[in-house]
Amino acid sequence: MNSKKPVSISAIIPCFNHWESLHTAVKSIKNQSLPVTETLIIDDGSFEPCPIEELIEDSKIRIIRLNQNRGRGYCRDLAFRETSGEYVLNLDATNSLEERFIEKALPHFSTSQIAAVYGALISKKKDRAVDRWRSRHLFQESSLKEASAETCSMLITYGTIFERKSIEEVGGFDPKLRYKEDQEMGERLTAAGFLIMGDPKIEIYPTVSNSVAEVLERYSRWYMDTDEKPSFKGYWHNLKASFRPMMELDLIDRDWGSAFISMLVPHFQLYHSIKANRSKCEVSKVEDT
């Protein structure tokens, strides 16, 4: 693909109670070297509606507010139905993009099988133990230094461009999945013969410093089983992984605070999977009635 050829790009931002960082996310989309056609913000049942007047009054930005929290699968499915761009740029409300994100990502679609291209999260602040843990274990930044762009079956959606027709060909995102909609979509794309491109040279920046509970919730969400159901097998696997390699890497760096967070991981993952499965069942009951 010639990245200079005009293409229609829809930008979507799912948001749940992160109004403090939303403005930065939107600004990073507006500042792209290649412009987007439309921007859609989906408020996934936040406690308070969007309070940022300049976003509400911007004619190029549309906000859809859900009356209850429906989860990430529902939001992504809705976003694809409510936008029309040939490509769909997804950005989490807690992140921002480098200015050439779209420009760097589009050439990867010159391979016809590429369905999605995502970048790498790069932390700018690592003063606190939780920030270092997030960088080391969640974003795994140290492994990105010498890495090159490569195809894989793993779909990451915190800063990603999708080719619309590829996603629609496999049936779109599953609206019933609250957290693992990306992993499940990646598996369906791979089974259909599509490729996913991860490029560590395309940078995304987290704009929110998480609490320990928030970073554990995010880690649990990323590494939950696709069916979102708790199991003893999964708990045992996570328990072993928390010791090696997680705590092992923390202790090599003499990062005692991070080691303590690693020790909490398998227990929080079990709690999170129980909570996610319960929420999923409750939503199903509401839809049935």
Image: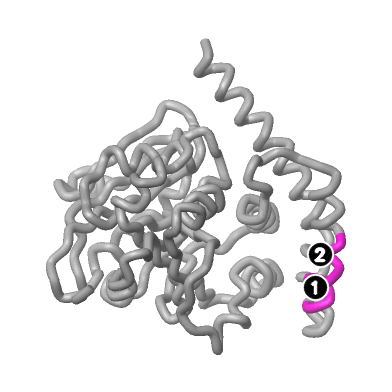
Q: Residues within 10 Å of mark 1 (few under 14, many from 20)?
A: few
Which x, y percent locates residue 63? 28, 40
Secondary structure mainly formed by the magenta segment: helix
Q: Residue at position x 66%, y 41% from top?
A: 228
Q: Residue at position x 69%, y 58% from top?
A: 212
| Residue that mark 1 sits on | 245
Which x, y percent locates residue 274? 73, 37
Q: Nearer the viewer, residue 183 or 253?
A: 183
Q: Is residue 144 left or right of residue 58?
A: right
* Residue 94 in view in this figure: no
Residue 247 in magenta?
yes
Image height of 161 relative to 70, above or below: below
Contact check, label 1 and label 2, Cβ < 8 Å: yes
Which x, y percent locates residue 104? 31, 77
Task: Classify the position of the N terminus by image quarter.
Answer: bottom left
Q: Residue at position x 54%, y 84% from top?
A: 147
Which x, y percent locates residue 31? 24, 69
Q: Nearer the viewer, residue 271 or 132?
A: 271
- The magenta stretch spans which residues? 240-249
Q: CA distance from mark 1 to mark 2?
A: 6 Å
Residue 50 in magenta?
no
Q: Quadrant for residue 272, please give it.
A: top right
Task: Name the residue type under label 2.
Answer: Ala
Q: Residue at position x 60%, y 30% from top?
A: 280
**Total tally of numbered discs in the picture:** 2
| Residue that mark 2 sits on | 241
Task: Name the residue type under label 1.
Answer: Pro
Colour scheme shown: one colour
* Residue 241 in view in this figure: yes
Q: Secondary structure at mark 1?
A: helix
Q: Is residue 166 left or right of residue 212?
A: left
